[in-house]
Image (cartoon, rainbow, N blue to C red):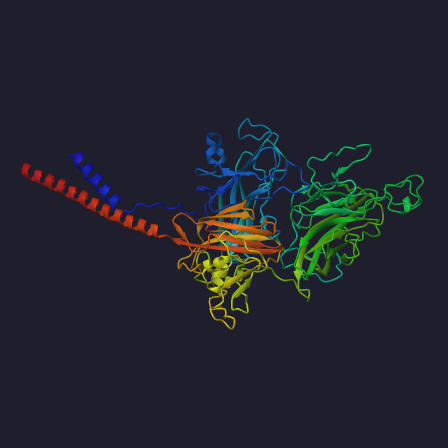
Amino acid sequence: MQWKRWLVWSLLALAVLAIVPRHTQAAPRLAGNLITNPGFEGAFVAQDDKTSVGQGWTAWWIPWFEGQPEWSYHHPDFIASAPCGSVCDHRIHSGGNAQRIFQYFGTYMAGVYQRVNVTSGSDVRLTAFGQSWSSTTEQPQNVSNGGTSMHLRVGIDPWGGTNPYDARIVWSSEADALDSWQQFSVYARAQSAQVTVFLYAAPDDARRKNEVYWDDAVLEVLNGDLAATAQATYPTATPVPVAVVPTAVSVALGQNMLVDGSFEGPLYIPCTRADALPWNHISCEGLDLRKVDGKREYIRWDTVQVPIGWKAWWLSPNKNTGAPDFYQNHPNRCSGDAPEGCVAWHNPEFRDAKGIVLGPSRIHSGKNAQKYFTLWSVHQAGVMQTVAVPPGAMLRFGAWMHAWSTNQDGREEFPDSYFSSGQSSMHMKVGIDPCGGENPFSPSVVWGAEHDAYDQFGYYEVRATAQCDKVTVFTHTMPEKGLKHNDVYLDDAELVIIDASGVVQPAPAAPAAPPAAPVNPVSPSSVVNAAPAPTALPRPDGAVVHVVKAGDTIFGLAFQYDVAMDQILQLNGLTKDSFIHVGQELVISAPPPSASTPAPVDTASVPTATSLPATAVALVEPSGRTELCVRAFGDQNADGVMNRSEELLKDTFFQVSDRSGKPVVSYTSDGMSEPHCFTRLTPGEYLVSVKPAAGMKPTSDQRWTVVLNTGTAATVNFGSRFSEDLAEAGDSAESGGAIGLVLAAVVLGGIGVIIYRQRRGRATIS
């Protein structure tokens, strides 16, 4: 009778399966891990035809720019590790997948990031496993042969920014992690309600294989002694310099507007025309650098290596040896006929400082600094950077510099040989051109006070008011004596906006989350697209006319004026696909049949700061960037307004096209890290098309016209809700559940019959 027992248990199991509802559930997060999809096990989402990243993550890379070698700064491929089969067995740290980033015969600076909600002020730790493969050959697989340094690291932006160049990011130590997994770790203290975690790689040189794999990222909030221990690894505040500073220096609290102000990034080599200024860069690609008839048309400045964002400048030495005033006009050499006291002027050589390990520290903070120098000669030189700023802004530019000037070579057995001696002055200072000019010799440059700092960093500062929409910052040195070593070291430069009293304006801080805040709170003070009240121009006939401003959309105007969108389209002969232009007059409402006075505009529906209309409104971006941001939310009440109780939605597809309709960039929301901002758009008009997630019905317009001006940011909020089809599907599911109950009843009834017959049979036998 054993088979009858098995039959009974099998039928009971079928009954339980029929009763229990069938559904799928996302893989749970690791205990204490705040990161979404930390092991890259979920679906991979395509950002473009070369970019597919684990759900919840966003890919980033630094694009190629003018002046770089053709093999550098590629957009690498982002794909899943799993499809590569058995050859990739050890390219997955755990589970069934990992994030793979690779480029053939080229370099890149790239990675993935994710924004994570945290409690402001909490101590957090990020760990992740990384591995790389850099090789000149395809075989053997997974073995680095003749590879290059890969520079893997992980970082945390305590303010929740998404710029991998931001100087506020706290980075782990770097490692190549060739052919084996290495765990990277970094600590930080959250400064807002979000932090951003970065996974980073930057191969030094082109190879046949430059591949990186990331897996098993963990972001944890620390408690107790562990957090206290972690504090010891945090970067410490910049110490007060020993060098005498002419004026009191305040610590920078505002946002640094410079690109790579800490000089940590990779270096590039520029090219110019031979008849142009050395800092008027052009692309090096395809240039003929040979001499023709003893002359060059183009020059590649191999002696000039500066980080991305910066340019080197110098006084070009006089090479006209036949001129009668040659020795009185910056001569490039002092020959035998030179007058007594002749000093040669040379182009400095620009390099990084990370290879200097003996003598006083030549790096103020981090792992690198900018170095430039001349040998047995003098120079007038420095570096510069042009930055977009709001006109009229009061600015402060500061930097840390020091010099090493001596006739001695540094020798380990003579410690004093690493210190300066014999120089009368280096004329060290910093300056600002308030209109963005790139001529360091222009009288319009505002220079700070000069003072020399030898062998230890001194602080240099200048303040000026922006006269245009951009400024250029300069550093300056000019040694008086042509000693054997005239070296300059520069680090930690900053450009911040200050007010009239000279107090630094702090960067906008994210508001603290309320105690019962939803998963994705939306704070009115941190959102850039709160709609302003509409401005109407009533005509004499009573019609209401709106003058289009940057960021206006037809849908948004309909919402603001509380009129039907079709009414605006019909009155102006437009369609949903039409572009509108800044300065264009749009008729919002027609004149009444007998109007003697202009019709009043109903502004009762103008949204307050606590409700966010789903419209793109362009506002001035303090950093000067031009960006378009997108966000999808679950519009529970179908009013087109994102409020505090409505959460972000994933799997909503945004397509940005230019005025001609050509796609420019796209993005699929992950429901966690939005708003997602496109920061590389040039000023102009764009069309944003939105496709809601499967099963969702739009409550906002699916096509938006957005006008971006220089230094403005616009945000598109797209609302959607579950469609009626889902409700029907729910009814079907309920019907399925009822069927399951009926099936369960039948099965249980059958079991009862079997048991009854079994017992009756036993009774008869007895």
Q: Position of residue 166 (x, y in %)?
A: 61, 51
Left or right: 12, with 186 as reference point: left
**Viewer-nearest residue: 415 or 705:** 705
Q: Residue furthest bottom?
A: 596
Residue 714: tell me if it is visible.
yes
Q: Residue furthest top?
A: 139
**Viewer-nearest residue: 213 or 57:** 57
Residue that appears at 79% across and 36% down: 296
Q: Quadrant of the C terminus?
A: top left
**Viewer-nearest residue: 52 or 538:** 538
Q: Position of residue 595 (x, y in %)?
A: 49, 71
Q: Quadrant of the N terminus?
A: top left
Residue 766: tell me if it is visible.
no
Residue that appears at 90% across and 44% down: 326
Q: Residue furthest front?
A: 594
Q: Position of residue 755 (x, y in %)?
A: 13, 41
Q: Position of residue 510 (x, y in %)?
A: 54, 60
